[in-house]
Image (cartoon, coloured by chain):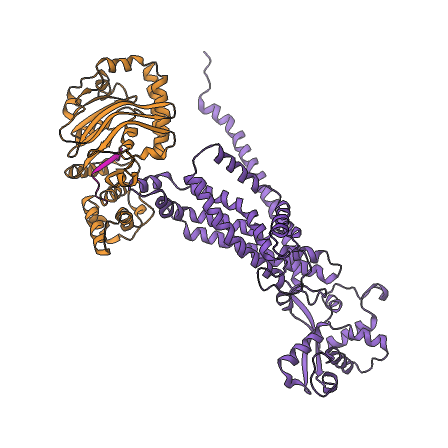
Chain colours: A orange, B purple
Amino acid sequence: MTMARMTDVNVTDDQDLSGDENKVAGSEVPRAAIDLPSLAITEQITELGKTVGEVRCEDPYIVAENVDVYYGDNHAIQDVTLEISKQEVIALIGPSGCGKSTFLRCLNRMNDSIESARVTGNITLGGQDIYGKDLDPVALRARVGMVFQKPNPFPKSIYDNVAYGPRIHGLANDRAELDDIVHSSLERAGLLKEVKDRLEEPGTGLSGGQQQRLCIARTIAVNPEVILMDEPCSALDPIATARIEDLMDELSEDYAIVIVTHSMQQAARVSKRVAYFHLGLLVEVDETDKIFTNPQHKLTEDYITGRIG
Amino acid sequence: MTRKPATREKLEAGLKRRRRKELAFQLVGMLATTVGIVFLGVFFADLLGKGSSAFVQTFVKLDVEFTEDVLAPGGELDLAYADFDGLVRDALREEFPNVSGRSERRDLYRLVSIAAGYQMRDMIIADPGLLGSTETIWVPASSTVDMFVKGNIDPALDEALRPLSDAQLAWISDLQSSGRLETQFNSALFNNGDSREPELAGIRGALMGSFYMLIITVMLAFPVGVAAAIYLEEFAPRSRWSDLIEVNINNLAAVPSIVFGLLGLAVFINWVGIPRSAPLVGGLVLSLLTLPVIIIASRAAIKAVPPSIREAALGLGASEMQVVFHHVMPLALPGMLTGAIIGMSRALGESAPLLMIGMVAFIVDVPGGFSDPATALPVQIYLWADSPERAFAERTSAAIIVLLAFLLLMNLAAVILRKRMERKW
């Protein structure tokens, strides 16, 4: 029974590729969570005393305490507590529609644009409440950048794509400085060599992998503190994926990276810690090695061994 | 054991039928298209056949002597007393010296338009030095002569039944044989306002009226429509109110245009007190008429912008207004402009609301501003179609051709704009 339901959820998630993923995921997932005759699972988790593993970390930068997200009546995320430090890559994994993308979008308030979404609990970024009255989401998003599932460069030139963020935030004083930001961002994103001679050509003319690296360059041009990545490689071929993963490795030295992925190999390769979500619940968080070699929770084990999801 | 027919056999059995159906459907589609094209062809052929002759006009060559005793009876040129028609009459008598008797002469004078006298007057005003000289001048023939030359009057008819007498026909053939009568481009059609005399009537007044109205409409309906669309699509919270507004906008697009005319009459003319027949009122009414079309088209264009672009901009920290003006607007603009131009061409072809606000009046002067009395092209067509003179029939068709040419131009502009500005993502 449970398995059948899971497949249902999967189907909706596949449609998510079309773009307004958060809406679909948001409205579909929690219904599954509520409809599901899976009290057993919920009990299983609560039985074990909330999230297993270690939700706390040393030197936390992002702290989410008892976060609940509702889409209308749907309870998309239930009581999630998680700490993320500044020098790590943390992977959020879990079956489709488990709330990992929703959680990711809470971290830069991208859920704000969905009218029915309601977030309770407390999320702080460097000690500042991101849902507080004194924090403008515009300022927050400049500090917490985001890379999306489908490469979405602006239909503008490569240069303008990267320069857009610095321009709107007024990060460069003159053209030379802006040139500098654009070049170094493209360099860091490993794209400069390929596009050096055609910065004025449209960013949409690049290949999928190049587009995604362009989006990463665009994000780091604003010099954020955290980069959120929502399945950044799911639309890319393995070679492009490998390049992005290398890039994440390099970027993790300067930025906290939170990545949502469906690929467990990817999570194993790039992340230091892994958080496993299931039906809106954060089931288990731990060091990557530990999760993949010795999961504490039955659900985690089922997922990573391919029995669910 | 009977073998079940394989998928292949079943498929082949039905395949022929499927193909036949497909063919039949294609044939029906082709037929429908052909019928449409045939009707359009007939319409255009008829229009061109009837209207093309209005672009030329019959002229008569006269040797006019600007005699001083006709123009300056008091010794000095006095426009108020100068008998310009007399000049034309003298020239005609000169041409046909044998014509005698009052009624015969009157028939002779009727060969040329009354515009001939005005033409003399304009010439003398432009160059007073002409006084005393003799000039060879082409003057417009009267509309009956014009109709006869264009083959619209049958000379075989009984004299009492046709507007031209036998004597007049004889003069016309005399003029033709001496090369003093020919058809030339009808510049009056484009330079003059309306007139009771067909050979003087032109569409300039109506064109300018339409032009002024469209300017008002573009300046009002486009910004207001686009602003409303952006607000409704990007900022307005989804609520019962926004649903109500949406339903009402869609309804407004379907309201018969004459109702807008009545609204204009009641509000803009009776209440606000703007003069009637003015392009200003017409433009306001047409703006109201076009507004829902522009809003609907703009909203559709905004909706078509992929949400991923919005997310990308938001994710970088762009404010909602920056998202709209930096990313959504440039991508939606071609669609918005197309909607606006289609709305404009609807406004250009609209006549019913203009009847309500007095733009159906007989206005001779070409309007020079937004508050001058004016009519519009479709109304001019309506007025001419209503006129009894045979010569107005071809001018009606000519006006329709001009209107269609403008509509075609506007739609072409819409296509070109869309092609130019469309960006791929």
Instruction: Measuring from the top left, give residue B258's x and y in whole percent.
Output: 64, 46
Q: Nearer the viewer, residue A229 or A212?
A: A229
User: Residue at the location (18% across, 39% down)?
Assistant: A247
**Which image quarter holds the N terminus of chain A?**
top left
Determine whether A13 is above or below B50 in the image.
above
User: Residue at the location (78% across, 75% down)?
Assistant: B109
The question of residue B308 being in magenta is answered with no
Direction from residue A70 to residue A196 in the image, left or right = left
**Which image quarter holds the C terminus of chain A?**
top left
Instruction: Measuring from the top left, give residue B75's x and y in whole percent.
Output: 72, 88
Instruction: Measuring from the top left, give residue A235's x and y in whole percent.
Output: 29, 35
Taking the image as drawn, is residue B183 in sight? yes
Identify the image quadrant of residue A285. Answer: top left
Q: Nearer the viewer, residue B7 or B400?
A: B400
Determine whether B192 is above or below A302 in the image.
below
The segment highlighted magenta reads A222-232
Q: Nearer the viewer, residue B164 or A86?
A: A86
Instruction: Measuring from the top left, give residue B393's x and y in whole percent.
Output: 71, 59
Taking the image as drawn, is residue A19 in sight? no
